[in-house]
Image (tube, coloured by chain):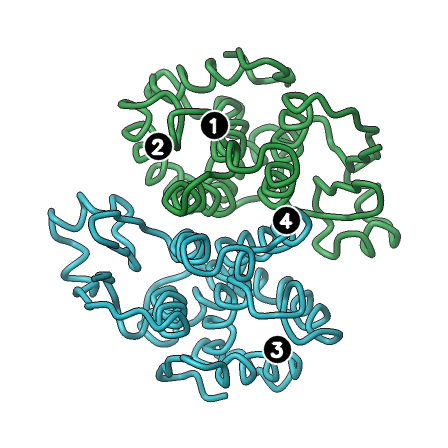
Chain colours: A green, B cyan
Amino acid sequence: MIMLYDSPLSGNCHKVRMALGMLGLLCTLAPGDAAARATLAFGAINPLRQVPVLNDEGFVLRDSQAILAYLAAKHRFGDWDGDTPAERGEIGQWLSIAANEIANGPATLRLAKLFGVLINEANATAVTTRIMPVIEAHLSTRDWLVGGRTTVADLALSPYLALAPDGGIDLTAYPHIGAWVARIARLPGFVAMPGWSY
Amino acid sequence: MIMLYDSPLSGNCHKVRMALGMLGLLCTLAPGDAAARATLAFGAINPLRQVPVLNDEGFVLRDSQAILAYLAAKHRFGDWDGDTPAERGEIGQWLSIAANEIANGPATLRLAKLFGVLINEANATAVTTRIMPVIEAHLSTRDWLVGGRTTVADLALSPYLALAPDGGIDLTAYPHIGAWVARIARLPGFVAMPGWSY
């Protein structure tokens, strides 16, 4: 059985919950709130003290993008992670954006507004303002980020974009992003999350 | 022929130059300095106005990690990008760290010290201080980041770690990182870069 160190309001955890739901894989949840992450035991599992962490029958993996890559390679090889070098490259572009701009932009604004975390708001706003129009323009001519089907790129980017209003971002300014996160919410096995209102 | 939009002192470009060198692939270089990146033509190629950008016979790809994923899938499938789901997941962990912590830590400190770019130094220092010991500890028991051989994880992380002294980071405090970047510099096809003194 898969075990997921999870925090219910974490968009990073939600990427993995969605993937597991769509794959029809059962998992048990282990606590990943701030108190749990502060323990010595958790530091040995993930020195960065972040969730999600996946434990698949003893194989332990941290980082939401990495867990998506692992689950794709194991259960949807080629389909979810690209079946040509070009698709793998294009998916890689979006995984980098998920790890950097999404994390340091909309996800960080949400941390401040929803949880009162002290952030550099000017930087998070600048990153958000730079990246959202790029994603909006890309989705204006296609239903999915890469290859005309759902891939890990969609799973990696969608939670913090669907949850962007939590951080004070008005998604009506980005109608193609809004339509795309609504499309993801209609996929079989999609898992609901508070704040994902599309 | 491959064309690479390149900037000689960019560590991100160096990831691609190293990969092409190790693969024995010829490429022509196109200008990717600030003036070139400010043009309308470049904005159409990469709206983020960053290098590297690869053009492989008309297939255009931006983002250094994505380009490594593409080149690996095309030329070293399984070997460079992982031949099991577990390896693919572990490589994914490091690619996220390259895209986020390395870019926003040591690479950003170098931007300030070497090029006078205005940065949030407290944040870049905090990110650096958090991630370097994790990498140092990981490399204390192995020669390569994943799978006992060179993978795109090593290519993605090594330039900005080898160049960390440019940003004022004393690498003698991280002997295993130092030994590892020296190991990479001895690989067949390695391409030299100013500041990579190991």
Q: Residues within 10 Å of mark 4 (few under 14, many from 20)?
A: many
Q: Which residue is mark 1?
A: A161
Q: Which residue is mark 2?
A: A135
Residue A58's place in the image compared with B27, above or below, is: above
In this view, the residue in front, A67 or B114, is A67
Task: Find numbered disc 2 in the image and state the secondary structure of the residue it sits on.
Answer: helix
Q: Given the image, on which type of amino acid does mark 2 rest? A: Ile
* Residue B155 visible to the viewer: yes
In this view, the residue in front, A65 or A165, is A65
User: Which numbered disc, 3 or 4, marks the residue that appears first in the sequence?
Assistant: 4
Q: Given the image, on which type of amino acid does mark 1 rest? A: Leu
Q: Chain of mark 3?
A: B
Both on one chain, marks 3 and 2?
no
Q: Given the image, on which type of amino acid does mark 3 rest? A: Ile
Q: Chain of mark 2?
A: A
Residue B17's place in the image compared with A1, above or below, is: below
Give the residue displayed 72% in from the left and 70% down from the top.
B137
Q: Residues within 10 Å of mark 1 (few under 14, many from 20)?
A: many
A124 to the left or right of A186: left
Residue A87's place in the image compared with B33, above or below, is: above
